Amino acid sequence: MFEAPYPPYDPQDKSSFAYETVVKRWPVIITNLIDHVHRLIHDLTMESQALANSGSTDPAIQLKIEEGKGIIAKASHLKYRMARDQELEMIPEDGEFYVHEYNSELEKLSQAGKNTWFTAPWLYAECYLYRLFRSYFKQSTLWTDFDPFYAKKEETFRSSVTAIHQIATTMHELETEKDKLVDDPDKLSVLFKEMVQMCLWGNATDLSLLTHLTPSDIEHLQTVGREAQQARKEFILKDDQDAVWEYIKGLEPQAGTVARCDFVLDNAGFELFTDLVFADFLVTHTPYFSQVVFHPKLFPWFVSDVTPTDFYKTIESLLSPIFFNATMETTPESAHHLKEMVERWRRYLEQGIFRLSTAVEDGHKKAQFWTGPWPYWYMEDRANSLWRFLAESGLVIFKGDLNYRKLTGDVKWPATTPFATALGPLAGSFPLLSLRTNKADVVVGISQGVADELDEKDKGWRVNGKYSLVSFLPKDRRE
């Protein structure tokens, strides 16, 4: 089994983001979970009292209240133990997958004396935390499918209405130029990079793409886009955009075959929306891909990660005339453009052009790996069917910070470590593109000079979200 030559990040270093996470971030997340369940119990209690006043009862409501109180008690106990650096407890046999796997990893940490909240490796402990949350709900009768983070995800998504409408109008304009774009790799190149950066930063206001794309505008975009990209370049510490585009241009799908791109998803809400836009661009406006498979997490994970429910609800919400509140920037035209685009996505889902990985053969089992306790180094051994599935892909795009941490093992690699080295045995398994905004300590693939300069001028550069990495590694063809 591969082992990195450097130790994992853990909270023992009080200057690390791992320490800040255990001291500040996790207790807040646990408190929010408790508060959310408590509010729901209050609502259920009011409902029960109203029934009692009318002379009836509902045993299911009473059971849900009691189970909710039990969940709160467990979460409160967890918060108490965490603050006092007590041992991580075994995941109970809850009927969910990977109980044995989490507990055997925990047993190894126990033998090494690294099984408390302030000594366990950060990546393992954070995955364990969300697996433990899952066990609280899974062991109940009436809360078993409850997502304690869904309301927050939905609220955040609603606040993105302006950017969503802007992008929808852009894609509408792009549709009118579709025939001209397909045969012009140079113009596609500019648009591809804009799509990458939209997904990278998750911020539509950065997009020079947001123009009405007449033919002359596309010409202008080639200039403006490059200028905007240049301005952002200092914040992209590793930039493989040209390399991945050159690779994509070399993909020449044969007639009658499927050229697939896979997205290993990160956050729900606006970020998932931008992923869908990017996927739409790849299959609708380029000749290189004909199918996209999206890989979600099977249960609520790291607060905001996409679950299958989130994925389908996103399509539903985008098509709802009442989900978003209208703003000064939204117009009937932009609303129509959004509906037009999302209906195309719905058709793509019906036709299998877009697919959720849970819908492919043995998809549920494949998807389990994403919520396991390990780095992705071990995919071939731990999730061979998933590894073989991704090996057939034309490009696998890993979104976000957690996926990057799992790709690199979240260990203390020197910043100059080549990306391929940090990927361990996964390197070369399939063409891999990681789009990551820095929100954790691990960084590889940059020069020592850049790292030293950033250490000098911006102490938080590894974790503050201002900087990013676009890291590409092609498939190793030696088979």
Image: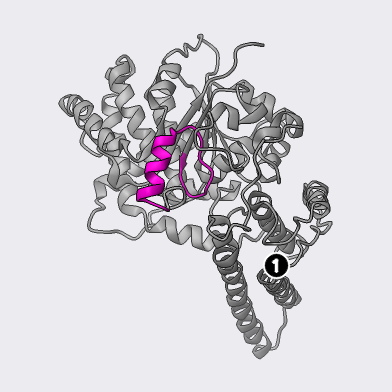
Picture coordinates of residue 287 (x, y %)? 41, 17
Observer-nearest residue: 427 or 324? 427
Quarter containing the C terminus: top right
Observer-nearest residue: 15 or 433? 15
Q: Please report the residue visible at 58 percent of the width from the left and 76 percent of the height from the top.
A: 39
Which portion, as a residue range, is magenta?
Answer: 436-459
Q: Relative to 332, is 18 on the left or the right?
A: right
Q: Please report the residue visible at 52 percent of the width from the left and 50 percent of the height from the top.
A: 313
Observer-nearest residue: 263 or 461? 461
Q: What element does badge 1 sit on?
A: loop
Picture coordinates of residue 415 (x, y %)? 50, 37
Q: Relative to 98, is 160 on the left or the right?
A: left
- Say which residue label 1 marks: 85
Quadrant for residue 359, please give it.
top right
Picture coordinates of residue 151 (x, y %)? 52, 63
Seen from this angle, which residue lies furthest top? 254
Question: Where 37 falls versus 368 (above or below)?
Answer: below
**How many other residues sit within 10 Å of disc 1, few (<14), some (14-19) or many (≥20)?**
some
Quadrant for residue 130, please give it.
bottom right
Question: Where 229 falls versus 461 (above or below)?
Answer: above
Question: Where 76 falls versus 268 (above or below)?
Answer: below
- Which residue type does callout 1 highlight? Asp
Q: Please report the residue visible at 79 percent of the width from the left and 62 percent of the height from the top.
A: 89
Picture coordinates of residue 332 (x, y %)? 25, 49
